[in-house]
Amino acid sequence: MSTKEIPTFSLENKDGFKWELRPTTIDMLEEFHNKVAENGEYLSYWIPTLHGKDFSVTETFVKNVVANHEKVKQGEPTQYCNHFIFVDGKIIGSIGCLRFNNETKVAEIGYWIDRNFQGKGIATVSTKVIRDKIAFELLGLKTAELHCADGNTASQNVAKRLNPDRTFYADCDPIPIRGINYRLVVYAFDNKLN
């Protein structure tokens, strides 16, 4: 059986700002946890579990990703394929495929970016690359989805800029975030390579 490699991507926006997407490895754990903790209050607004207060939560995530990368390399069903976002050699965020349904070949793309690096096109360009090169080409998924709370306009705008094939509300109860119930909007992108 041939193995698959999870590539690193060097990216640039239209203004020449550069960053990299590197596959998550265990040696990135401490730096990643520190970045989550630094952005904890901001991140936990939309992702309540991502507050950075508990190292074991970050450690469990990174270890699960690394274990799942081995499955990706062997062509086995997976639950994660994640990259950390680097600017000038430092982690400024995370992006990847998660919540796989290996039967229907659908996964969600999730991401977050340090608030000091927003507005540079990093989320939009990186999501397109993860969708096209990882979800569709490497993993052979049929559909990649972005899930956003209906009040999270920044993430909704990322999805809209990428021209989803379908947009709908998820079939789930509203998500309570800081006392407000938000509906989950799903932006679905179909693999046109197959």
Image (spheres, grey):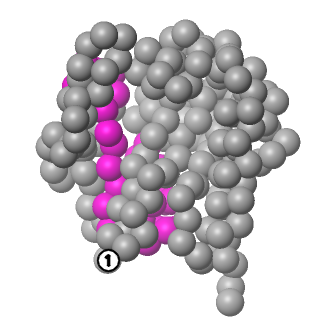
Examine the rendering and report whether any part of residue 120 can be seen: no
Q: Residues within 10 Å of mark 1 (few under 14, many from 20)?
A: few
- The vertical placement of 186 against 43, above or below, is below
Residue at 74% over, 38% down: 59
The quadrant holding residue 89 is top right
- The vertical placement of 24 against 194, above or below, is above
The residue nearer to you, when weighing 86 against 28, is 28
In this rendering, the count of numbered labels is 1
Examine the rendering and report whether any part of residue 135 can be seen: yes
- The vertical placement of 7 against 128, above or below, is below
In what element is the residue under mark 1?
Answer: loop
Q: Report x, y in % for residue 163.
A: 22, 44
Mark 1: amino acid? Asn
Q: Is-magenta flag for residue 161?
A: no
Which residues, given as a range, are shown in magenta?
127-155
Location of mark 1 (residue): 194
Q: Report x, y in % for residue 176.
A: 31, 21
Q: Report x, y in % for residue 83.
A: 62, 45
Residue at 35% over, 62% down: 106
The quadrant holding residue 183 is top left
Residue at 54% over, 40% down: 95
Residue at 31% over, 61% down: 143
